[in-house]
Image: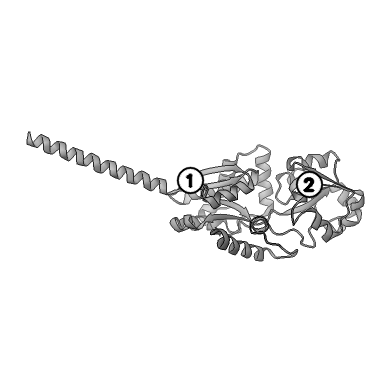
Amino acid sequence: MRKIKELLCFSLVLTLLLSMLSGCAAANAEKKTVIVGGKSYTEAQLTSEIIAQLLEKKTDLKVERKYDMASAICFESICRGDIHIYPEYTGGMLLAYLQEDVEPGTDPQTIYDRAKAGFKEKFDLVVLESMGFNNTYANAVSREFAEAHNIKTNSDLAPYTPQLTYGAEHSFFDRKDGYENMCATYGFQFAKEVKMNVALKYQSMEEGLMDVVNVYTTDGLLSQLDVVVLEDDKNFFPAYYCCPVVRQDILDKYPEIETALACLKNCVTEQDMIRYNSMIDSGKMTIPVAAEEFIKEFGLLDK
């Protein structure tokens, strides 16, 4: 009888110990979860997924994904701690969140340095190294029009603007680096402005509803349409280099994040991003497959 009691006590103690160890392991696993956020458009989801897959492949962290967020919501989420890391653009950091002016001609490194310092000081967010591509604004015209008038730059376009219609999404007309200051810089005097949904810009240009369209320099459709992207010869538009942004408290807990993502430094060009955005937008690749292919193509697991 005594032996039975001893065995029961031993069994109970063992069960309690196993339960405690299991609980500790579960708590530890929960603590080692990193939440990667992402905005709603193609490029943002791709870069978020690249970050997520690199963390999964190069660390033992568990990754949770929260994509399809509006830009402002994404930023608010990382400040609140609802997400821990997401890709952001240097020009947007300064203009939208730090509320700083950017003088035309400011070099990309200066913009990066100011964004990095400002995000750390004001929000305790760490801006990691740039991926190397600049997704800024630009103006595009049809190749036929550009070749007929020998137009290669925004300055070349200026004399023709009184006969032309300009199209852009609504927000471009309200930005400091948007329509009014662009026109003042280049002396544009367009006959008409058209505000539209961003998804309709290229279609509207093809249908002849506008002559000049505001584009992003890594738009996937740039590889599919017969347009000429004009040089911003007065450097009006600030640099928008893509960088992972991570909460300082998360980086303190998991310093391996910075090590795992160091391979992203200057890994890709604008033309590379146009190609990947185009493959996704055309349905040739899903976001996860494109991210996996991106990591392989640029050898990110070997860096």
Q: Amino acid at mark 2?
A: Ala
Upstream in sequence: badge 2 or badge 1: 1
Q: Nearer the viewer, residue 47 or 68?
A: 68
Compared with 108, 294 (above or below) is above
Asked whether the beta carbons under mark 2 and mark 1 sit within 8 Å of each other, the answer is: no
| Quarter-of-image position of residue 187 | bottom right
Mark 2 or mark 1: which is in front?
Answer: 2
**Residue placed under numbered mark 2 in the picture:** 168
Q: Secondary structure at mark 1?
A: strand
Compared with 16, 105 (above or below) is below
**Residue placed under numbered mark 1 in the picture:** 63
Give the residue drawn at x 14%, y 37%.
7
Neighbour tally class for label 1: few under 14, some 14-19, many 20 plus, Cα within 10 Å: some
Q: Is residue 217 left or right of residue 123?
A: right
Image coords of residue 211 (percent x, y): 86, 46
Report the coloring of the rendering: one colour
Image coords of residue 14 (percent x, y): 21, 41
Q: Is residue 161 left or right of residue 22?
A: right
Q: Is residue 190 left or right of residue 243?
A: right
Image coords of residue 264 (percent x, y): 57, 56
Work out how far the residue at label 2 is from the one at label 1, CA to CA, in angstroms.
36 Å
Q: Nearer the viewer, residue 54 or 170?
A: 170
